């Protein structure tokens, strides 16, 4: 079985949690942005793949986006300009003894530690692309009433950054471009943001209240369960968990769990930490496991 791993950033999960109801006003979580506000949106993810209990692949991705709230467009959607301010990615393929990546804080790190000419060229091209991507802006449109999201401009900044990559071999250049564009495009970033803001219940909720969402994945659709654990004056703690779902074609089960902290006044995500595990069912020929750990933060910048 081929295991395909990529950076699909963001969350998911469903629920079994018991809480005692308290006499407390319920909160109606609704996204609220104010023109002129700025946020640091921080995301980190680690994917670990093992086969027959042996580590095979480890991928890491961490980045920060600066969000600037512009205002409303003609249709009433909130416009946000977003730009990468930092980026780190790393992939260790133990079967190939290959490590590739990029770190905006130490741009030459992976080039200097490359194992052989092929790996060095790949890391050099990653650096050229990501150096050109840092600071470039795209636009996010939020429909605050139902958290609908649209993304534009990622295709353009990706193409512009790829034009900065110096590759002579036409076939290799085309393969590199296709690989990068499969992960860095309007649709992919939109999916990631939609998943990140899919926690909104669409109704007032208090301590002990729960709601569900569906999360489509490549191997299964999880029923995500959310339940309110506690409410503070300015924030709400939410548990997120799902029962494992089995995909008979892949002979694997998938499940997720995690915790969220939400701004009770604006409905915005403050912090989340989630863990998704996909593993072979007992008795399958190939014993494969993939664990994805993600963390997100949205930090309002002080004026």
Image (cartoon, rainbow, N blue to C red):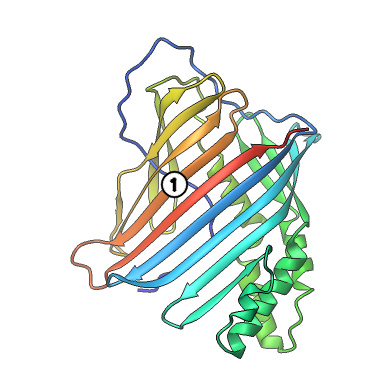
Corner quadrant of residue 248: bottom left
Quadrant (top left, top right, bottom left, bottom right) of the C terminus: top right
Vertical placement of residue 228 versus 85, above or below: above
| Residue 297 in the figure: left or right of residue 22 | right
Residue 56 in sight from this viewpoint: yes
Residue 6 in sight from this viewpoint: no
Vertical placement of residue 40 versus 107, above or below: above
Q: Residue at x 54, y 18 (%)?
A: 233
Residue 158, position as x, y percentages in the image: 73, 64
Q: Residue at x 54, y 21 (%)?
A: 28
Which residue, as the protein is rendered here, is positioned at the far left? 283
Vertical placement of residue 238 versus 54, above or below: above
Residue 156, position as x, y percentages in the image: 77, 61
The secondary structure type at the circle numbered 1 is: strand
Residue 133, position as x, y percentages in the image: 74, 63
Q: Residue at x 68, y 74 (%)?
A: 108
Q: Residue at x 40, y 40 (%)?
A: 224
| Closest to the observer, 42 or 169 | 42
Q: Badge 1: few (under 14), some or many (20 or more) residues near its Cα, within 10 Å?
A: many
| Closest to the observer, 54 or 25 | 54
Quadrant (top left, top right, bottom left, bottom right) of the N terminus: bottom left
Residue 276, position as x, y percentages in the image: 39, 52
| Residue 175 in the figure: left or right of residue 199 | right
Which residue, as the protein is rendered here, is positioned at the far top? 23
Mark 1 = which residue? 274
């Amino acid at each position: 079985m081929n295991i395909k791993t990529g950076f699909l950033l963001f969350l998911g999960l469903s629920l079994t949690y018991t809480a005692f109801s308290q006499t407390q006003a319920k909160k109606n979580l609704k996204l609220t942005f104010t023109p002129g506000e700025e946020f640091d949106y921080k995301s980190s993810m680690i994917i670990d793949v093992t086969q027959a209990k042996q580590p095979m692949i480890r991928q890491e991705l961490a980045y920060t986006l600066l969000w600037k709230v512009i205002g409303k467009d003609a249709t009433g959607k909130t416009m946000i300009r977003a730009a990468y301010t930092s980026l780190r990615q790393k992939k260790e393929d133990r079967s190939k003894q290959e490590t590739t990546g990029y770190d905006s804080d130490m741009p030459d790190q992976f080039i200097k530690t490359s194992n052989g000419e092929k790996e060095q060229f790949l890391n050099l091209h990653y650096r050229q692309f990501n150096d050109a991507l840092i600071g470039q802006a795209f636009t996010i449109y939020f429909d605050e009433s139902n958290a609908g999201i649209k993304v534009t401009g990622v295709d353009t900044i990706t193409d512009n950054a790829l034009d900065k990559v110096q590759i002579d071999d036409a076939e290799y250049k085309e393969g590199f471009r296709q690989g990068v564009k499969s992960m860095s495009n309007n649709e992919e970033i939109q999916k990631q943001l939609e998943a990140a803001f899919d926690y909104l219940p669409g109704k007032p909720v208090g301590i002990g209240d729960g709601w569900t969402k569906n999360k489509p994945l490549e191997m299964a659709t999880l029923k995500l369960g959310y339940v309110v654990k506690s409410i503070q004056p300015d924030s709400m703690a939410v548990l997120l968990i799902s029962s494992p779902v089995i995909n008979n074609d892949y002979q694997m089960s998938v499940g997720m769990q995690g915790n969220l902290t939400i701004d009770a006044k604006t409905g915005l995500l403050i912090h989340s930490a989630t863990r998704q595990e996909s593993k072979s069912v007992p008795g399958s020929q190939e014993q494969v496991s993939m664990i994805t750990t993600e963390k997100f933060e949205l930090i309002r910048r002080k004026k």
